[in-house]
Image (cartoon, grey):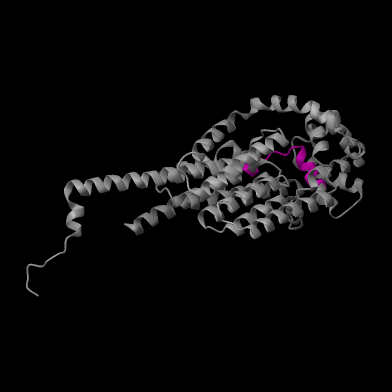
């Protein structure tokens, strides 16, 4: 029986691996070459050259050869037209992006392997998506077998939260892969130090994951899965990584980022002085205007809140709480509800639900079996010694 179950589990895992590869290939074919791609290519080029004209030329030439949206990238707004016409202004926009260091390096080294600039970021995103898909398939197989496991895999991996990140020239799919791997190490392998260390590495992909790494560390320390020394070291590594990245990337900081993304694009951010009171005055309006776009995530948060008050395991509760709190903090700091930011929430809420249902299903089956045994007297007979009719 066990061999048959293992065979079925292998078949399901293979099916899910094929689906992950197909969805990853689709993400490459339906890749979204938006304005971010220009800037990430510029950051990778800037790591080898400080000449603004050369950086500008390489980035725009790469997109002009491979993007059907090149006209939109260069003429859609006065801001884009200005950056297309002015290499120095384009160079001033790059510190908003260069802080995502590991993603920028991945683009650079893929290009050195011979992949065209405009494809590099999409390859990173698609490969990261496939990696998450394979890990989720392996994770699900511990709790669910048969066709149900494939259905649940699709519920997690085929939702816009995951697929949109896979299609973008952004670090979101890669950071999601790191965070999901960290969760799996913590929850399924009880590798609390190493799992949290992987979450700290995600700070080098998206510095806002400093908040997640910190919240996760504190949550695991509170349930005594990390001691005080380990927690202090991980918090120090997280904060040190963030400080290093912000300093050496020349990042402009949160105030200027908020001004640039939500109040008005700045053609020359390096020459602009932002006022705290102007950001605070605009903040309530920006936050309220973003709320109608939160519909998709409401279901995840409602389900996550229910799971937190249910009989979920302590480790799952700690990781789930840290992830949900991080999502809320992310929204408060950067009020954008784009699906690509919230892949880890989709995974941890779904996997928490699967584990709860699997545990309760096993408990229900145990109760039913005990009731059947009691009613038929099987358990009583099982406890009696067995005597042979023949003399010894």
Which span of residues is magenta-colored?
27-42
Whether the magenta-drawn stretch holds residue 36 is answered as yes
Query: Quick one: quadrant of the N terminus?
Result: bottom left
Q: Is residue 370 left or right of residue 177?
A: left
Picture coordinates of residue 173 (x, y %)? 65, 45
Q: Is residue 226 visible?
A: yes
Q: Is residue 311 left or right of residue 283?
A: left
Picture coordinates of residue 339 (x, y %)? 63, 36
Quarter holding residue 89: top right
Query: Quick one: quadrant of the C terminus?
Result: bottom left
Residue 349, above or below 18: above
Q: Which residue is at the front of the view, 39 or 236?
A: 236
Picture coordinates of residue 88 (x, y %)? 92, 41
Residue at 36% across / 54% down in the picture? Answer: 5
Q: Is residue 26 visible?
A: no
Residue at 67% across / 34% down in the picture? Answer: 338
Quarter holding residue 266: top right
């Amino acid at each position: 029986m066990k061999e048959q179950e293992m065979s079925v589990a292998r078949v399901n895992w293979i099916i899910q691996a094929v689906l992950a590869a197909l969805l990853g290939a689709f993400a490459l074919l339906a890749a979204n070459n938006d304005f971010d791609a220009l800037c990430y290519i510029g950051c990778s080029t800037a790591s080898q050259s400080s000449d603004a004209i050369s950086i500008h030329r390489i980035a725009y030439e790469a997109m002009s050869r491979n993007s059907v949206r090149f006209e939109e990238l260069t003429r859609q707004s006065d801001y884009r037209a200005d950056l297309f016409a002015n290499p120095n202004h384009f160079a001033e926009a790059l510190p908003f992006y260069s802080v995502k260091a590991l993603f920028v390096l991945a683009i650079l080294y893929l290009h050195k392997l011979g992949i065209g600039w405009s494809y590099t970021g999409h390859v990173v995103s698609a490969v990261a998506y496939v990696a998450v898909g394979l890990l989720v398939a392996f994770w699900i197989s511990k709790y669910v077998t048969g066709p149900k496991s494939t259905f649940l895999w699709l519920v997690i991996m085929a939702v816009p939260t995951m697929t949109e990140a896979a299609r973008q020239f952004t670090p979101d799919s890669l950071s999601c892969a790191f965070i999901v791997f960290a969760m799996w190490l913590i929850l399924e392998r009880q590798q609390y130090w190493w799992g949290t260390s992987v979450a700290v590495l995600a700070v080098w992909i998206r510095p806002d994951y400093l908040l997640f790494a910190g919240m996760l560390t504190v949550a695991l320390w509170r349930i005594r899965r990390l001691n005080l020394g380990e927690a202090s070291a991980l918090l120090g590594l997280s904060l040190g990584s963030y400080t290093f990245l912000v300093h050496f990337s020349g990042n402009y900081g949160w105030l200027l980022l908020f001004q640039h993304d939500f109040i008005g694009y700045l053609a020359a951010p390096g020459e602009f002085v932002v006022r705290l009171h102007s950001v605070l005055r605009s903040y309530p309006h920006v936050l309220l205007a973003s709320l109608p776009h939160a519909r998709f995530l409401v279901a995840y948060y409602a389900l996550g809140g229910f799971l937190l008050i249910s009989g979920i395991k302590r480790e799952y509760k700690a990781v789930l709480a840290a992830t949900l709190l991080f999502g809320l903090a992310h929204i408060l700091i950067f009020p954008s509800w784009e699906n690509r930011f919230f892949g880890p929430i989709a995974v941890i809420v779904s996997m928490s639900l699967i584990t709860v249902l699997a545990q309760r299903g096993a408990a229900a089956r145990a109760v039913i079996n005990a009731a059947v045994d009691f009613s038929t007297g099987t358990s009583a007979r099982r406890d009696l010694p067995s005597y042979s009719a023949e003399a010894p």
